[in-house]
Image (cartoon, rainbow, N blue to C red):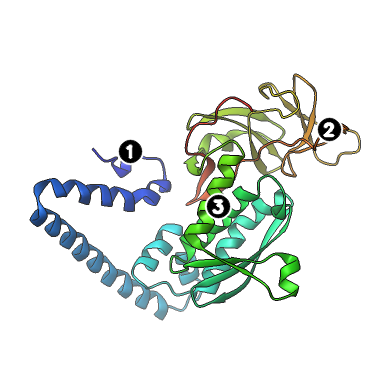
């Protein structure tokens, strides 16, 4: 039996509403072609009915003196998605994509990266990544955040994306990547790095972490280490790349010469900069720099959510 909305947590339930509706429609096929056709017609009638109601609501809102009311309505993800379904969203595609990228930009900035919307030509979007987004190990996560959350949610009409390298931008050279192909590359890189494609899960308990506190959480079979520095929350895979052990018992502390608190492994005492993508802070002469594996942590539909591999992460590599 499909999950009922009231049994799911918070507004995040509505992100999967389309899947639940499709599951129910598929189930009607067991009653034959006529039953399936009637079920689809019922859905169409309901959608058109609510679409007409939304259209009248927008007309009334547009006639009111408060110019900010419409902006407050479309700032709600659920309302915005309904308006998109019915072709009623008041903002053009550039505004929607820009606003969506702005919502993930603080997370990218906390890890030393950024993303820029260069242009939109027809149904093609041109993006450019900057900072650590270009080369850090979480670049696949960065792409997934910006492409799936920013572009797919805000502008479902976009069919392709041009990822423009900074050096290529000056020469007016771009690489056109169909949206499906780009996402396949993102997921493939995630698997190469030891995981699988990411899925979002609500984690409201992380909000209870106090400044300077570190905690371990089990999310969809994955063990996640989370900490709060000031008002900002950070999440990482529970794995120390220096000793290949768990970070259980790790703590934040001030290191000489460091402005922000750093995370210290309780076993090998390796230090990591949790504010900047988990970069290792200890000098290593016999190999590449070590780093923690960052995990995206964002507010989605007003619910704190984390992106972990769809399949549980195994033992540390």
Q: Quadrant of the C terminus?
A: top right
Quadrant where the N terminus is found in the figure: top left
Q: In the figure, 256 relative to 132: above or below?
A: above
Q: Quadrant of residue 98?
A: bottom right
Q: Which residue is mark 2?
A: 254
**Spot occupied by residue 236 in the image (x, y as percentages of width and height):** 64, 36
164 left or right of 13? Answer: right
Residue 185 disc label? 3
Q: CA distance from mark 2 to mark 3?
A: 39 Å
Q: Position of residue 228 (x, y in %)?
A: 68, 37
Q: Nearer the viewer, mark 2 or mark 3?
A: 3
Is disc 3 surrounded by few (<14), some (14 to 19) or many (20+) residues within 10 Å? some
| Residue 125 pos. (x, y %) | 56, 70
Residue 114 is situated, as x and y percent measured from the top left of the image, at 69, 58
Q: Which mark is residue 7?
A: 1
205 in relation to 49, above or below = above
Contact (Cβ within 8 Å) of mark 2 with mark 3: no
In the orientation shown, which residue stands out farthest toward the right?
257
Q: CA distance from mark 1 to mark 2?
A: 43 Å
Q: Earlier in the sequence, mark 1 or mark 2?
A: 1
């Amino acid at each position: 039996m499909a999950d009922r909305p009231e049994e799911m947590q918070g507004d995040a339930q509505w992100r999967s509403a389309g899947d639940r509706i499709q599951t129910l429609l598929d189930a009607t096929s067991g009653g034959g072609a006529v039953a399936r056709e009637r079920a689809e017609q019922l859905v169409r009638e309901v959608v058109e009915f609510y679409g007409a109601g939304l259209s009248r609501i927008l007309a009334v809102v547009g006639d009111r003196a408060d110019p900010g009311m419409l902006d407050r309505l479309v700032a709600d993800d659920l309302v915005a998605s309904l308006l998109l379904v019915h072709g009623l969203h008041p903002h053009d595609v550039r505004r929607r994509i820009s606003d969506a990228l702005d919502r993930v930009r603080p997370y990218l900035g906390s890890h030393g990266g950024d993303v820029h919307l260069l242009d939109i030509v027809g149904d093609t979007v041109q993006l450019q990544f900057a900072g650590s987004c270009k080369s850090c190990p979480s670049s696949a996560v960065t792409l997934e955040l910006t492409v799936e959350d920013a572009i797919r949610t805000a502008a479902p009409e976009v069919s392709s994306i041009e990822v423009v390298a900074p050096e290529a931008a000056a020469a007016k050279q771009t690489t056109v990547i169909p949206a499906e192909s780009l996402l396949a590359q993102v997921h493939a890189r995630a698997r190469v790095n030891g995981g699988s494609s990411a899925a979002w899960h609500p984690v409201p308990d992380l909000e209870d972490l106090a400044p300077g506190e570190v905690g371990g959480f089990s999310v969809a079979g994955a063990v996640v280490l989370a900490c709060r520095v000031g008002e900002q929350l950070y999440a990482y895979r529970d794995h120390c790349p220096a000793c290949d052990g768990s970070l259980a018992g790790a703590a934040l502390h001030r290191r000489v010469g460091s402005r922000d608190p750093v995370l210290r492994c309780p076993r090998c005492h390796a230090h990591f900069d949790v504010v900047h993508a988990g970069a290792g802070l200890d000098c290593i002469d016999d190999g590449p720099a070590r780093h923690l594996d960052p995990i995206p942590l964002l507010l989605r539909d007003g619910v704190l959510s984390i992106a972990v591999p769809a399949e549980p992460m195994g033992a540390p590599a």
